[in-house]
């Protein structure tokens, strides 16, 4: 449950915060300040993790790499493909397959362990959108008289 707190912002920080809120309808100074403080604390707790904006909202990502949900999605696929891999071998295989350094894979794993619901939700949303797009493509192929 959120509780009110008194926070003093420098004038230039408050101005930038106000510009951000005006550029993002539906947000408030309070909700944006809460979001950014939460993200800053998560980045502090999980070295190598940053937050990026995108069409589906802000999401956790590797500082110089893909989104965390993409890494974890690939990890799940690799685990299904090679279930006998040990944890370290799986991490090393992920690094080899994706071109990421082992530390980057470890950073994504560490973040996922802390926030699995957030990442699983992103993976599920991506899978649902992919299924939707595939169904649309199949319907289009049928309409055009081509067998999918």
Image (cartoon, rainbow, N blue to C red):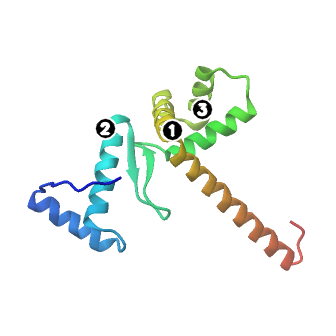
Q: How packed is label 2: few (under 14 Cα within 10 Å), some, or many (20 or more)? A: few
Question: Which quadrant of the figure contains the C terminus?
Answer: bottom right
Residue 135 image offset from top left, x and y in percent: 77, 67
| Residue 111: percent from left, percent from top | 46, 37
At 62% from the left and 56% from the top, the residue drawn is 126
Taking the image as shown, residue 90 lies to the left or right of residue 13, namely right
Q: Label 1: how many residues lie within 10 Å, few (<14), some (14-19) or many (20+)?
A: some
Residue shown at the point (30%, 61%) measured from the top left: 32
- Disc tally is 3
N-terminal of the pair, mark 3 or mark 2, is 2
Q: Toward the viewer: 114 or 66?
A: 114
Cβ atoms under marks 3 and 2 closer than 8 Å = no
Tell me the residue that label 3 is attached to.
94
Closer to the camera in the image, 101 or 62: 62
Identified at 44% across, 47% down, the residue is 60
Residue that badge 2 annotates: 44
Front disc: 3 or 2 = 2
Q: Closer to the N terminus: mark 1 or mark 3?
A: 3
Depicted 51 relative to depicted 22: above or below: above
Instruction: Place residue 10 in its image quadrant.
Output: bottom left
Asked if residue 132 lies left or right of residue 108, the reply is right
Check disc 1 and report the residue beneath it: 112
> Is 31 displayed left or right of 132 in the figure?
left
Whole-number angstrom distance, CA of label 3 to CA of label 2: 24 Å
């Amino acid at each position: 449950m959120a509780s009110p707190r008194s926070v003093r912002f420098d004038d230039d920080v408050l101005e930038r915060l106000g510009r951000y809120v005006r550029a993002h309808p539906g947000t408030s100074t309070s909700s944006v300040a809460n979001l950014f403080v939460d993200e800053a604390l998560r980045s502090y707790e999980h070295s190598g993790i940053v937050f990026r904006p995108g069409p589906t909202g802000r999401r956790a990502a590797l500082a110089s790499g893909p989104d965390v949900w993409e890494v974890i999605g690939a990890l799940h696929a690799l685990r299904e493909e090679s279930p006998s891999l040990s944890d370290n071998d799986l991490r090393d295989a992920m690094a080899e397959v994706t071109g990421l350094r082992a530390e980057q894979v470890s950073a994504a794993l560490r973040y996922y362990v802390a926030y699995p619901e957030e990442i699983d939700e992103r993976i599920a949303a991506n899978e649902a959108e992919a299924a939707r797009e595939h169904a649309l493509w199949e319907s289009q192929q049928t309409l055009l008289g081509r067998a999918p």
